[in-house]
Amino acid sequence: MKDREIEKLIKAEEKRQKRVINLIPSENYVSQDVLRALGSVLNNKYSEGYPGKRYYGGNVIIDKVENLCRKRALKLFKLKPEEWHVNVQPLSGSPANLAVYAALVPLGGKIMGLTLSSGGHLTHGQKGSVTGKIWTQVPYAVDPKTETLDYDALQKLAIQEKPNIVVAGYTAYPRFVDWKKFKEIANASGAILMVDMSHMAGLIAGGVYPSPFPYADVVTTTTHKTLRGPRAAIIFAKKDAREFDKKIDKAIIPGLQGGPHENQIAAVAVCLKEAMNPAFKKYVKQIIKNAKVLALSLSKCGWRVISGGTDSHLLLVDTWMDGKGISGKDAEAALEKADIIVNKNTIPGDQRSPLDPSGIRLGTPAVTTQGMKERDMKKIAERIHKILSR
């Protein structure tokens, strides 16, 4: 690389990534093939529009790349092309969610989404996001005692508020989600059911987490977390008389985006193929095993694990402990000094600021990619305990 400054920084970041223990659940390490696709000449082509319907010439090969990615997305999640439409052009998860609302929810309409402190995402109608400025959030929270979803309470809220869309699937909820019950909630209130499976997409593809597709109307996902791909997103929409597929395509272009990043789409296609390999199923099974052991080990050390454990790749830990412990911000900083990377995170009922919350969020996708197993999780838990107890 001729730009020595950037080359030096890239090498420094590569060295950092190899040195640290990365426990951020939304990060992972991609394959060399994914990186090659991202850095390919596909970056040079402008392909505004969709395959066969572009606004520029010269897209014969690009169309094949995008169509292959769409085909693989349907195949990986065992979806029939006559029943499901897939759009692989969203640049990331937040724009994908925004596109769904722009397509399906009237301005000022209601988005029923989980609160941030309970594990929801900003783009599920939170006030800090544009989704909470254009639309109105109907917030719901986990049960304060169990720290899990109370589906009966959610159904009563939905019937009372009549949201246009109900959002399930979260950024910091460690337990299985009952998609069937969410479908019942959406049906009872006349709402669309949207599932944001960004965090658990790889787990669903590998068969270790329940699939939302038998119940959802629309499914969005990023591809860079448990799916172990590039930073990108996909939208799946059921094909029926409501024409969600056509509305969402129009929301992406011309609504929100211009030309898609076809190098990124090619990299998504690569990761989708990798996820079809039998080795990927072993990988996601190990992710779950590692997360469970990490949660149990931290609990044995005296830390309060939210909801008592995890069913997935992530866990939340109450580090504040009613003032007896350490804030999430300080915990994150102390661990990073020891090369353990986590992120500060709110916990259910948190009274502290999201910038200095009561807990931390831990995940095992990246360390599992590096080959770590249960015995490593026990050692990591002991090290975390030692650092945070100082």
Image: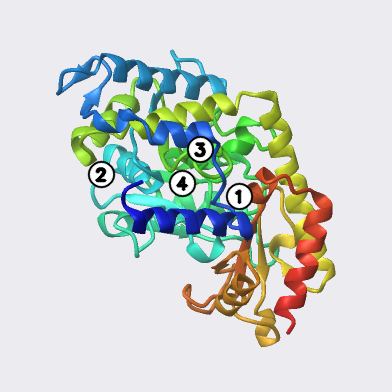
Choose mark 4 or mark 3, whichever is in front.
3
Whether residue 321 is visible: yes
Give amino acid for label 4.
Val
- Indicate the secondary structure of the residue bearing disc 1: helix
Dot 2 or dot 1, earlier in sequence: 2
Q: Residues within 10 Å of mark 2 (few under 14, many from 20)?
A: few
Do the residues bearing badges 1 and 4 touch, measured as CB atoms within 8 Å? no
Dot 1 or dot 3, earlier in sequence: 1
Judge whether 95 appears above or below 351 on screen.
above
Dot 1 or dot 4, earlier in sequence: 1
Q: CA distance from mark 1 to mark 4?
A: 13 Å
Residue 334, quarter of picture: bottom right
Do the residues bearing badges 2 and 1 touch, measured as CB atoms within 8 Å? no
Query: Residue at position x 42%, y 31% from top?
Result: 37
- Indicate the secondary structure of the residue bearing disc 2: loop
- Indicate the secondary structure of the residue bearing disc 4: strand
Q: CA distance from mark 4 to mark 3?
A: 24 Å
Do the residues bearing badges 2 and 4 touch, measured as CB atoms within 8 Å? no
Q: Residues within 10 Å of mark 4 (few under 14, many from 20)?
A: many
Give amino acid for label 3.
Gly
Q: Residues within 10 Å of mark 3 (few under 14, many from 20)?
A: many
Choose mark 2 or mark 3, whichever is in front.
3
Identify residue for label 2.
106
Identify residue for label 4.
167
- Where is residue 259? Give x, y as percent: 22, 33
Identify residue for label 1.
151
Q: CA distance from mark 2 to mark 4?
A: 16 Å
Give amino acid for label 1.
Tyr
- Indicate the secondary structure of the residue bearing disc 3: loop
Residue 326, quarter of picture: bottom right
Dot 4 or dot 3, earlier in sequence: 4
